Image (cartoon, helix red, strand yellow):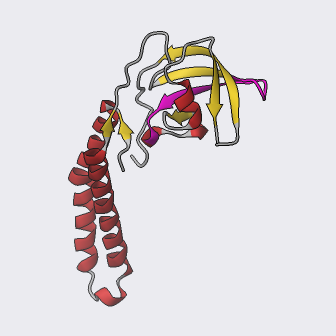
């Protein structure tokens, strides 16, 4: 895996693990017990559905624990005038003659439909460490790249609305 995560990402993942272990796991075990008590397991759809939900929760817990264990911790600190993780950047695309705003986040929180791009995406990687007013080349593929201009940088930090996928 080796995802790049910030300390706040680790904290949010741990919160989800704790919630799944303390709340969801208990509910799932109780649902399995109730379904099992209904009688014949060979034709008991509720039992199989409850088991499936319980296994899905356990699988998610293992996935998140493995993610934390193998994560590479990165800093979300940056200079006041440079693009860093958790900063909102206004970017002018020269080819389209359009300006768009993006928040640079780690891969686990990336969601381009919500205006959050990964620090490992071509655009995110190109913007990191640059300043407002700079013209930056974005290498999209081996054959194609384009220029953007950083219009402004907003040091936003992490908002409560930013969520880890699945939580």
- Residue at 22% x, 59% y is 26
- Residue at 52% x, 31% y is 125
**Is 84 left or right of 126, judged from the image as shown?**
left
Image-quadrant location for residue 100: top right
**Is 51 left or right of 122, judged from the image as shown?**
left
Q: Position of residue 112 (x, y in %)?
A: 58, 39
- Any part of residue 19 in sight: no
Q: Nearer the viewer, residue 33 or 119?
A: 119
Q: Position of residue 108 (x, y in %)?
A: 43, 42
Magenta stretch holds residue 101: yes
**Residues in magenta?**
92-107
Q: Is residue 114 above or below residue 17?
A: above
Magenta stretch holds residue 4: no
Q: Is residue 47 above or below residue 142?
A: below
Q: Nearer the viewer, residue 42 or 100?
A: 100
Q: Is residue 143 above or below residue 95?
A: below
- Any part of residue 129 in sight: yes
Q: Position of residue 51 (x, y in %)?
A: 31, 72
């Amino acid at each position: 895996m080796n995802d790049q995560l910030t300390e706040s990402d680790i904290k949010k993942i741990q919160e989800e693990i704790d919630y799944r272990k303390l709340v969801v796991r208990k509910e799932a075990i109780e649902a399995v017990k109730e379904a099992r008590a209904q009688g014949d397991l060979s034709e008991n759809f509720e039992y199989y559905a409850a088991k499936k939900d319980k296994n899905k929760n356990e699988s998610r817990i293992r996935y998140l624990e493995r993610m934390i264990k193998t994560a590479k911790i990165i800093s979300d600190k940056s200079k006041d005038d440079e693009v860093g993780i958790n900063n909102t950047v206004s970017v002018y695309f020269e080819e389209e003659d359009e300006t768009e705003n993006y928040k640079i986040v780690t891969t686990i929180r990336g969601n381009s439909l919500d205006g959050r791009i990964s620090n490992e995406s071509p655009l995110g990687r190109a913007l990191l460490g640059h300043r407002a007013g700079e013209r930056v080349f974005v290498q999209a593929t081996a054959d194609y790249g384009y220029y953007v201009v950083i219009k402004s940088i907003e040091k936003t930090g992490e908002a409560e609305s930013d969520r880890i996928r699945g939580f």
